[in-house]
Image (cartoon, rainbow, N blue to C red):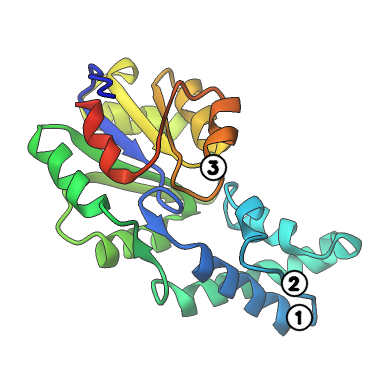
Amino acid sequence: MNYSLDFSAVIFDLDGTLLYTLEEIAATGNAALSRLGHATHSVSAYRTFLGGGAKKLAWRILPQDGRNQENYDKLLPVLLEEFELSLNTIARPYDGVLEVLAVLSSAGKKLAVLSNKPEEFSKIAVEKLLPGVNFEAVYGALQNVPLKPEPDRALKLAELMGTTPERTVFVGDSDVDIQTGLNAGMIAVGAGWGFRGADELKEAGAKIVLDAPADLAKLL
């Protein structure tokens, strides 16, 4: 099916949308937990922990009987240390991502990234794993700046790219991403190949859910 949307720009989530990072994040989280003597989790369990940024991840991976402020305050800085140590050691672009980004760019569509991963880590990941892609900007989590699903930075990206929300596609793999796109008045498209799956994306309000990165070309 070809959706033939009227759009001029695309904003992408990063983890689970452009990059397969699940195993890397799981290794990072488990290393941090182990350092503090907590039980670790399976890789698949991390699918439900992701989507809210590092602070929410730190809280979610704590054992249920250990979710308290003291343990959280100890875990978060250790988690960030482990992120820096493991960044881009396992992560990779999903199959077809680089090719379809080139197709979109060649079609004159402006591209940007909006992640809840810390901005420094997001920029490093894009530079290393998505080389040569002409992103107008890469935004990640910053101190005292609203995270997704708040629409603030998505709207700022649309303005930066010289377009309107109505002509901007927002692509992501979680309910947080779909909510962000809808909150910003954008065209919310689900990355069904990502961490959460098509059902969650549809329940969150995505009218279009794609099966593979290559399917993004069907939006043209």
Secondary structure category for the residue under label 2: helix
- In front of the other: label 1 or label 2? 1
Quarter of the image containing the C terminus?
top left
Dot 3: within a 10 Å radius of its alpha carbon, few (fewer than 14), some, or many (20 or more) residues? some
Quarter of the image containing the N terminus?
top left
**Residue displayed at 35% across by 44% down:** 212
Marker disc for residue 74 = 2
**Residue displayed at 39% across by 40% down:** 211
- In front of the other: label 3 or label 2? 3
Q: Nearer the viewer, residue 182 or 144?
A: 182
Secondary structure category for the residue under label 3: loop
- The x, y position of residue 182, in whole percent, is 48, 22
Q: How many marks?
A: 3
Sooner in the amino-acid sequence: mark 1 or mark 3: 1
Decide: is 105 above or below 44: above
Marker disc for residue 36 = 1
Dot 2: within a 10 Å radius of its alpha carbon, few (fewer than 14), some, or many (20 or more) residues? few
Decide: is 199 above or below 122: above
- In front of the other: label 1 or label 3? 3
Marker disc for residue 133 = none
- The x, y position of residue 107, in whole percent, is 10, 33
| CB within 8 Å, label 1 to label 2 | yes
**Residue displayed at 79% across by 75% down:** 39
Q: Is residue 83 left or right of residue 92?
A: right
Secondary structure category for the residue under label 1: loop
- Badge 1 amino acid: Leu
Sooner in the amino-acid sequence: mark 3 or mark 2: 2
For residue 11, which quarter of the picture?
top left
